Image: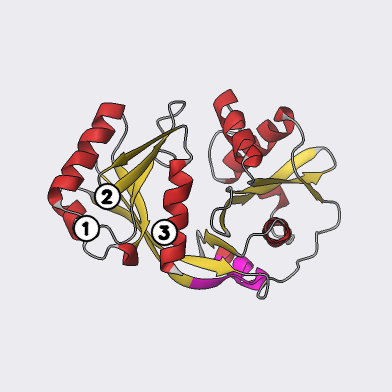
């Protein structure tokens, strides 16, 4: 499964507005934002990587005006971390990723008073982005570039899901465009006012169901804490491997 997930990560990066291949790395860059959580690289599975390759990666990010950063499944190159640490990189986080298939998936009832639907307009997308930003402790706003990025993901087969309480966006989630029968579910968030009602589980279950309905075989995600971990396990997600987040301050 590790190999399949890492191949998916590389494929997803290749679909960024400005994707570049730097030796054994693929970097997905977006000219509309300098966010390191959007602009990062990942190694090609099984590629032989040297210190010179890492230096080339750093130079390419510097030329693009972006912070050198990588996300990858650790088993795809067990020696890479040491090369990066030697070059001055610092580990941001180590996460387990979880996977779900149609055989393990469980339905979760939508709480009373809520409706789950895909955004139909850019105004809907902006409301969803603002709600997710607020859910993760950021400013509740959405830029035109944010909205365009979500729309592009949907046009390429990704899924966005909004949870509505009457006309108020209470939260939602996104799933990235599938590749090789795999899709990543990310950004599952609920505004604080609407938490502790089972909404996060319903959102996770429904967006995963829609992925399977579109032909996806494996959905994967990462949990941000014990509470979210329990939510995802109830939906049918189970631990499958480890990923590393690592970057270089310049």
Q: Secondary structure at mark 1?
A: loop
Q: From which residue to which does the magenta span run? A: 229-239
> Gap between marks 3 and 1, in whole Å?
15 Å
In this figure, which residue is indicated by the disc labeled 2?
24
129 in the magenta segment = no
Residue sitting at x 81%, y 59%: 111
Left or right: where 196 falls relative to 93 = right
Residue sitting at x 74%, y 39%: 119
Q: Which mark is residue 132?
A: none
Q: Which mark is residue 48?
A: 1
> Residue pushed farthest bottom?
103
Q: Nearer the viewer, residue 250 or 214?
A: 214
- Are the two marked residues, 1 and 2, in contact with CB atoms closer than 8 angstroms? yes
Q: Secondary structure at mark 3?
A: helix
Residue 19 on image: x %, y %? 40, 36
Q: Nearer the viewer, residue 183 or 44?
A: 44
Q: Is residue 207 above or below residue 169?
A: below
In this figure, which residue is indicated by the disc labeled 3?
6
Residue 28 on image: x %, y %? 40, 39
Residue sitting at x 64%, y 49%: 173
> Gap between marks 1 and 2, in whole Å?
7 Å
Residue 107 on image: x %, y %? 75, 68
> Gap between marks 3 and 2, in whole Å?
13 Å
Q: Nearer the viewer, residue 69 or 129?
A: 69
Is residue 191 visible to us here?
no
Q: Secondary structure at mark 2?
A: loop
Q: Quadrant of residue 65?
A: top left
Question: What secondary structure do most residues of the magenta stretch adopt?
Answer: helix
Which of pointers 3 and 1 indicates the residue nearer the eye?
Answer: 1
């Amino acid at each position: 499964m590790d190999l399949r997930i890492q191949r998916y990560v590389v494929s997803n990066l290749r679909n960024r507005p400005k994707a570049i291949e730097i030796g054994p790395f693929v970097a997905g860059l977006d000219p509309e934002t300098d966010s390191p959580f959007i602009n990062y690289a990942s190694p090609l599975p099984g590629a032989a990587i040297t210190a010179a390759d890492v230096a080339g990666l750093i130079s390419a990010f510097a030329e693009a005006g972006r912070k050198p950063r990588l996300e990858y499944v650790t088993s795809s190159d067990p020696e890479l971390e040491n090369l990066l640490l030697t070059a001055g990189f610092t580990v941001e986080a180590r996460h387990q990723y979880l996977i779900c298939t149609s055989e393990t998936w469980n339905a979760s009832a939508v709480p009373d008073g809520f409706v789950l639907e895909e955004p139909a307009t850019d105004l809907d997308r902006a409301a969803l982005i603002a709600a997710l930003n607020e859910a993760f402790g950021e400013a509740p706003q959405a830029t035109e570039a944010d909205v365009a990025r979500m729309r592009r993901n949907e046009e390429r087969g990704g899924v966005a899901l909004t949870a509505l309480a009457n006309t108020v966006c209470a939260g939602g989630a996104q799933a990235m465009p599938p590749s090789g029968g795999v899709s990543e579910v990310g950004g599952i968030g609920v505004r604080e006012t609407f938490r502790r009602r089972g909404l996060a589980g319903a959102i996770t279950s429904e967006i995963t169901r829609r992925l399977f309905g579109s032909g996806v075989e494996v959905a994967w995600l990462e949990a941000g804490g014990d509470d979210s971990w329990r939510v995802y396990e109830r939906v049918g997600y189970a631990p499958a491997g480890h990923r590393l987040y690592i970057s270089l301050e310049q």
